[in-house]
Image (cartoon, grey):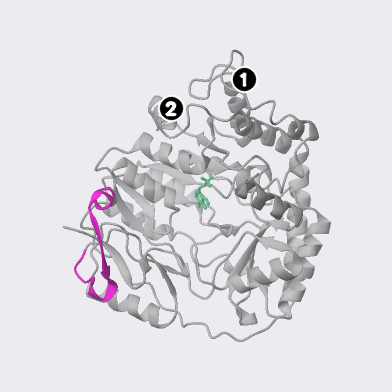
Amino acid sequence: MSTPLYDALMEYVKKETVPFHMPGHKQGRVLPKEYIENLAKIDLTEVPGLDNLHNPDGPILEAEKLAAKTFGSKQAFFLVNGSTAGIYAAMYAVLNPTDKVLVMRNSHKSVYNGVVLTQSIPVYLLPEIDYENGIAMGIDVERLEEVLQKERDVKAVVVTYPNYYGFCSDIEKIVDIVHKYGKILIVDEAHGAHFPFSNNLPKSSIKAGADIVVQSLHKTLTSFTQTSILHLNSDRVDVDRLKYSLSLFQSTSPSYILMSSIDMAREYMEKEGKKRLEEVIQLALYVRREIDKMEGIRCLGEDIVGRYGIVDFDVTKLTISVKNLGIEGPEAEDFLRRECNIQVEMSDVYNILAMVTVGDDEKRVKMLLEGLKKLSKNRKRVKFGDRILFPSLPEMELTPSEAVRKKKVRVPFEKAEGAISADFVTPYPPGVPLICPGERIEKDMVKYIEVLYNKGIKVLGIQDNLLSVCEI
Ligand SMILES: Cc1ncc(COP(=O)(O)O)c(C=O)c1O
């Protein structure tokens, strides 16, 4: 038998690695036994009585109505292709070709892809960048207002709330400003599906009044990977067009396992999940206090609030800075995996990110603390690069959708001056694209990339010194 993928999965399972990563159910720890046992049996299709996701009038509609009530939205649509599909559908529902859309420059790939799919014209807003910690943080609300005042024909605004690390911009002000200018606000709340269930977490943008909110339930709640909900939360969006858009980006054979797991996650949160979440929040606060006692590492949180457009943060996202240990995040991540059998969610140059969910308990959290204690003794000296400020954004010559349709050629980046980029060029940290498809590469930008290179900063989009440009 040759089953390389299944074998690799089972190898991970057998190691009993402690997961501080997604999905939030943490390998089924909070899923009912009966549900797990019946998974293969409920992998069904649209037989009578089981409804149809694309035109629901039976149990799927009922489950969606319950979800809307629980999460506090007007209407909920189940997604089986993640928030990625929800973001595509939301953008497709409100944007026509050549419409302008305001997007954050550090948006997830799905937002950029949404710009391409809708053939819209992006107006980019740079996030506030915390150079010390190497993270693209929040939105400067005054800057947002300035842009909306200037760009009167913007049709919709897409923001990410919270960011991957759990840091939150001032969503209430953002809702007010976007609505003051009569625009539609789409919120990528992929990392905030748990927000509606606790007053000790940041406010959900559903409650704040955003028009469309997309949440990944698989990330921070207990449903299976690829499950999300698109919440329609206002009357400003054409529901029929939204339904059509959803049908464009989802399978005509949506998985009943996935759909039922959304239903189960909602029910769990309504019953014991809420209480469990409060316990987990307390555990996360305990971990934060313990980390503060360790040398060389610290957990980002309160110190960020009030800076970089951030007004709140999710305590369950443990962004642990290892910068003062003199090691880089990936090395810390490897150390925890090799030496402590712990897998974190991700690492960047300065930080590792561990997430605790309702699937965790005190025992596991203590294992994380033990691992971090060992890590904090693992000092080294790496000379980190100096902070290099983000340059101004390049001119857009072609829209992203025009640029991706052009023939691409690869040129040495030193010779790219004057060319139009066909790809993203993104330094890490902070992971914000310097250049997007369709933008003109000016001399200053080439020089800037050279500086990054010389300082050893990773630049995605440049491989073997080559960069993709549009053949004009
Ligand atoms: C900010 C953000 N938005 C959207 C997505 C897409 O979500 P999904 O994986 O549910 O498709 C992700 C995924 O990592 C994300 O980090």
Q: Is residue 412 magenta?
A: yes
Q: Is residue 355 magenta?
A: no
Q: Which residue is mark 2?
A: 243
The answer to whether 413 appears left or right of 352 in the picture is left
Is the CB of mark 1 within 8 Å of ligand 1? Answer: no
Q: Which residues are magenta?
A: 401-419
The quadrant of the picture occupied by the C terminus is bottom left
Q: Secondary structure at mark 2?
A: helix
Give the percent coordinates (x, y) of residue 346.
59, 62
The answer to whether 192 appears left or right of 315 in the picture is left
Which residue lies at the image location 79% right of the left edge and 63% below the top edge? 367
Which residue is farthest front? 1
Give the percent coordinates (x, y) of residue 2.
62, 46
Is the CB of mark 2 within 8 Å of ligand 1? Answer: no
Question: Which amino acid lies under the numbered mark 1 shown in the image of this protein?
Answer: Pro
Give the percent coordinates (x, y) of residue 331.
62, 73
Give the percent coordinates (x, y) of residue 97.
26, 40
Name the disc covering residue 59, or none: 1
Q: Quadrant of residue 454?
A: bottom left
